[in-house]
Amino acid sequence: LAAFCGEFCGSESVGGDARTVSSLVVPKNERRLRLRDSGKTHSIGTADVDAGASLWTTDIWEWQRACQREGAGAKLWREVAAYAAAATGGATTLECSAVHETPPKVVAAVGPSISEYHWANTEDREAGCAHLLATRAGIDRGPALLRGAADEWAAIREWSLGKLVLDHGQFLGTVRIANGRTFRFCEVHHPDVLRGIVNPPSWTAEMSLAEFASSIQHNSTRTRSGLRFYLQAPLDASLLSSVDLARSPFNLIGDANSSGEASALRSVLGQEKRGGINPPPLAASLSQAPRMWMSAAGSVSPLHFDASPSFLTQIRGEKRFLFYPPKALSGLYPYQNNHPLRRRCRVDLTNPNLDRFPEFERVDKAQAMEAHLSPGDVLFFPPRWAHYVESLDFSISVTCRFRQSRQASQQ
């Protein structure tokens, strides 16, 4: 197994502090594989493993070759590989062996940084809260970077790709797939896509966290074929317990009465049982359930904008954002709202075509605003601020979005 994991991870040896995998077995009465390490058993997959069961007992390499073909066993093999690499190589093995690219060079003009507030500093923290409350009141002061606002989250201390695979490997999410490192959102079930009028620049598939982790490895069959993967999934109760969205700054945005915000959000996150309240104030304020986003280094989300106020908390790795204000949207040439690429912009910041998009020259002179996120940082941005996002390392982020407050909507 050490040799197998070394080949999978592209390394010659396994970390010295790694745990030892004692066995990988297919129980006779179950159509499920189990990995045992240090006395703990992890369930792996629910696929039909009959074809691989007899091979497994005789020759792991023969079974590997059979399962790596894109047949019934391919998904299961990818999950097995991720579990075994995480168990034998330590918490960071899967991240270190993931594909690592440099984002394409942005040639558009980049100007000042967005407003920054250091959460550990009392004065900065008060100023940051005032910034958010102004947005709630309908005054758009732009994006804000709250340095260290999530430093106390358990997720900051505990989450790594390896640990998440071992503890939550069967967690299911939607994975966006692209031919290359640029992930342009597309509604794949839009009528124009189904009729062949629009060729989708990306597509989606449901994957377990273990399969996603295996797919982004630098020497995986999928990566070598040019495919890249970006996971996005609503957090389940077990993962939500590691984040704290019930306190400032997150309770300062949305259409909720302040006295009930914290208890309402705890109820939404399953941390507290409440009765007789329908609906909880802050639950009604959330426009989207909290989500986890995972991407390999070099992944890019091109210019797009969101329709509601949003927080993004950086858990692992670093990200870079470039922002343009709502007044610049016309010069970024967004697709119409009924298009499969709605809320996406036509202008490519790595190669802007001024012949096709002449108004971008005016926008470019005003320059994009920049934000650089590290683990523990929280980024807030109001609706309709176009943003371009680069993953500078293997990245894990958590987002939550809120409905616009009535006061802000009226404004």
Image (tube, rainbow, N blue to C red):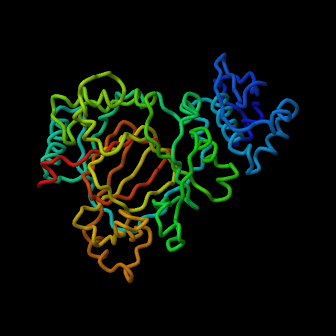
Determine the image quadrant of residue 256.
Answer: top left
Nearest the eye: 317 or 358: 358
- On screen, residue 72 above or below 336: above
User: Residue at horizontal 43%, vertical 40%?
Assistant: 234
Determine the image quadrant of residue 280.
Answer: top left
Q: Position of residue 37 (x, y in %)?
A: 67, 22
Nearest the eye: 303 or 117: 303
Nearest the eye: 138 or 396: 138
Q: In the image, 79: left or right of 237?
A: right
Q: Tell me the quadrant of the picture where the N terminus can be found.
A: top right
Q: In the image, 148: left or right of 281?
A: right
Can you name the residue that lies furthest to the bottom here?
355
User: Residue at horizontal 65%, vertical 21%?
Assistant: 41
- On screen, residue 209 above or below 361: above
Q: Position of residue 106 (x, y in %)?
A: 42, 64
Nearest the eye: 149 or 55: 55
Q: Position of residue 345 (x, y in %)?
A: 37, 67
How many tags in the picture?
0
Q: In the image, 191: left or right of 21?
A: left
Q: Position of residue 247 (x, y in %)?
A: 25, 30
User: Residue at horizontal 37%, vertical 45%?
Assistant: 373
Can you name the residue that lies furthest to the top here?
39
User: Residue at horizontal 56%, vertical 51%?
Assistant: 205
Q: Tell me the quadrant of the picture where the C terminus can be found.
A: bottom left
